[in-house]
Image (spheres, helix red, strand yellow):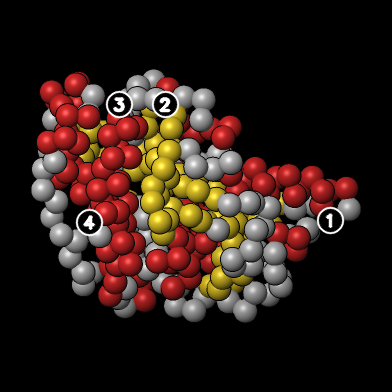
Amino acid sequence: MLKKTISAALILALMAGAIPASATDNTIPKQQLNEKLRAMLPENIRERGYIVAVNWGSYPPYEIVVSPTELEGASAELATAFGELFGVQMKHQTVSGLAAMLAGFDAGRFDMAIGPSGDFPDRRGKIDFIDWVKEYVAFAVPHGNPKNIGSLEDVCGLRIAVMAAGSAERVLKAKAQECETSGKPVQVQSFPDQNTSILAVRSGRSDGFFSGQAPLTYFVSQSSSQLGLAAANLPNGFGDIYQGTIAPKGSPLSAALLAGFEVLFENGTYEAVMKKWGLEGNMLPKPGINLAK
């Protein structure tokens, strides 16, 4: 029997006494079946009647893993809207970490990942990114920011948590090499997911967690003032960061998903979902494939 698990993000919310009103009060309108979009799906998906959508762990407020086959959050609501537009069931699967997700794509076990996942050119060998989010990278730190982290330049000599195999880990490791030459090495602590990383900061094992600003803002809001956000809205080793849904490179599914996003942008569903989950600052004016330079 599958044991149901609740993400650390939701546990923090319950400990705080409430889940944000924005996550519970608004209903996203049901979509009507769009036959033109359905016709764009690969034939095998139309025949079997479902899409396998993978995620690599909780990434609130986008993806909040309730069980290995059940999601909540902004991405989950967009996935539901896609299922309604395409007239298929969306089946969610959870794997441990980005590397496992990409390996599953290589093996053909998954059709897509609703994401959002970081769109970086070196990841595009076998996959497309249908981008629908612009993100920033910041730090979650103990309340009061005791190590005075004001930007990525301040991490030398500190213990910094990061998610394994992600873009933030790559940037942090490059900075750690600079710190090594200055005699103040960074202890890069790579964890498999957001929950483990944020708990390392809460427990005092890490001085900060370097990750996407949107999920960190969510964690901070649910921490009963135990955490704060540092170095927000700064480059921190990155240029423009686009994030999106993943599909096989050049596949009919990539084109279908882009067309589906265009419908959701046009009919206001995308805006409603993003605002419901406090993601107004991460909205794009329109979706696109492989937008990052």
Q: Position of residue 128 (x, y in %)?
A: 43, 32
Residue 138 against residue 125 in the figure, above or below:
below
Q: In screen coordinates, is 293 left or right of 68? A: right
Q: Decide if residue 3 is on the left or right side of residue 189.
A: left
Q: Amino acid at mark 1?
A: Lys
Q: Secondary structure at mark 2?
A: loop
Q: Residues within 10 Å of mark 3 (few under 14, many from 20)?
A: some
Comparing 271 with 100, the one in front is 271
Q: Amino acid at mark 4?
A: Asn
Residue 267's label in the rendered image is 4
**Rendered image: mark on residue 133:** none
Identity, as a three-letter code, of the amino acid under mark 3: Pro
**Front: mark 3 or 1:** 3
93 or 77, which lies in front? 77
10 Å crowding of disc 1: few (<14), some (14-19), many (20+): some
10 Å crowding of disc 4: few (<14), some (14-19), many (20+): few
- Write down the residue under mark 1: 184
Disc 3/disc 2 C-alpha distance (Å): 9 Å
Viewer-nearest of discs 4 and 1 = 4
Helix, strand or loop for disc 3: helix
Q: Earlier in the sequence, mark 3 or mark 1?
A: 1
Q: Quadrant of the N terminus?
A: top left
Res 249 label: 2
